[in-house]
Amino acid sequence: MNGQIGILNVGAGDTKLVFDPTNPMECARSARIVRDMLKRGYVLFVKVGEKYQRALDFDEAHCEYIIADLDAPPIAKDEDNGEQGGTETGAEGAAKDAPPRPRRGRPSKRVEAGKVQAIAVPRSAGG
């Protein structure tokens, strides 16, 4: 199964974009379109397991959706200095290699676009 996006409620009817890993040109084209849709205010819902979760961003270089990791606990600010909680200890090298985490809110996770189904809804849909 290739990843695809159903784009709802467009002028010419509903359309689909496909992320086919065997066709890099089509993946690059679809990635540009998804990035543009997010800039224009579309809402993207990505099917993760049995649930749909909202995509916060899209990484064109790796064709990955960036979604909020709802399974991880929220990140809270440390009251003492306004920074994230926790201190650097002997695992400094491992912490530097880890992807950056947001300063507050929920950490994000990445989902490969070629393996999941998604739905895109424009701002003007439904109303």
Image (tube, rainbow, N blue to C red):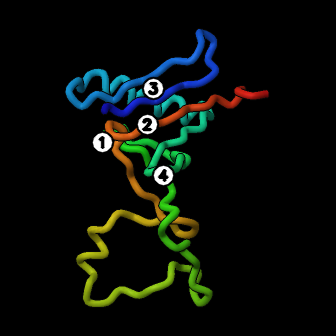
Residues at discs 4 and 3 in contact (Cβ within 8 Å):
no
Mark 4–mark 2 CB contact (< 8 Å): no
Q: SS class of the residue under badge 2?
A: strand
Q: Judge by depth and name the residue closer to the eye, 79 or 73.
A: 73
Q: Mark 3 points at which residue?
A: 33
Depth check, mark 4 against mark 3: the one in front is 4
Closest to the observer: 92 or 42?
A: 42
Residue bearing the label numbered 4: 67
CA separation in Å, label 4 and label 3:
18 Å
Query: Sequence-wise, which precedes: disc 4 or disc 3?
Result: 3
Q: Residues within 10 Å of mark 4 (few under 14, many from 20)?
A: many
Q: Mark 1 points at which residue?
A: 62
The residue where tag 2 is placed is: 117
Rounded to the nearest whole Å, what is the CA distance between mark 4 and mark 1? 14 Å
Q: Residue at x 42, y 23 (%)?
A: 17
Which of the image's four quarters has the C terminus?
top right
Q: Mark 4, mark 2: which one is toward the viewer?
A: 2
Q: How crowded is mark 3: few (under 14 residues within 10 Å), some or many (20 or more)?
A: some
Q: Which residue is drawn at 32% across and 36% down?
A: 114
Residue farthest along the front direction in this orientation: 50
Element marked by disc 1: loop
- Label 2 neighbour load within 10 Å: few <14, some 14-19, many 20+: some
Q: Earlier in the sequence, mark 1 or mark 2?
A: 1
For the residues bearing labels 3 and 2, Cβ distance under 8 angstroms? no
Q: Residue at x 37, y 25 (%)?
A: 18
Q: Indicate the amino acid at tag 4.
A: Ile
Q: Is 93 displayed left or right of 53 in the figure?
A: left
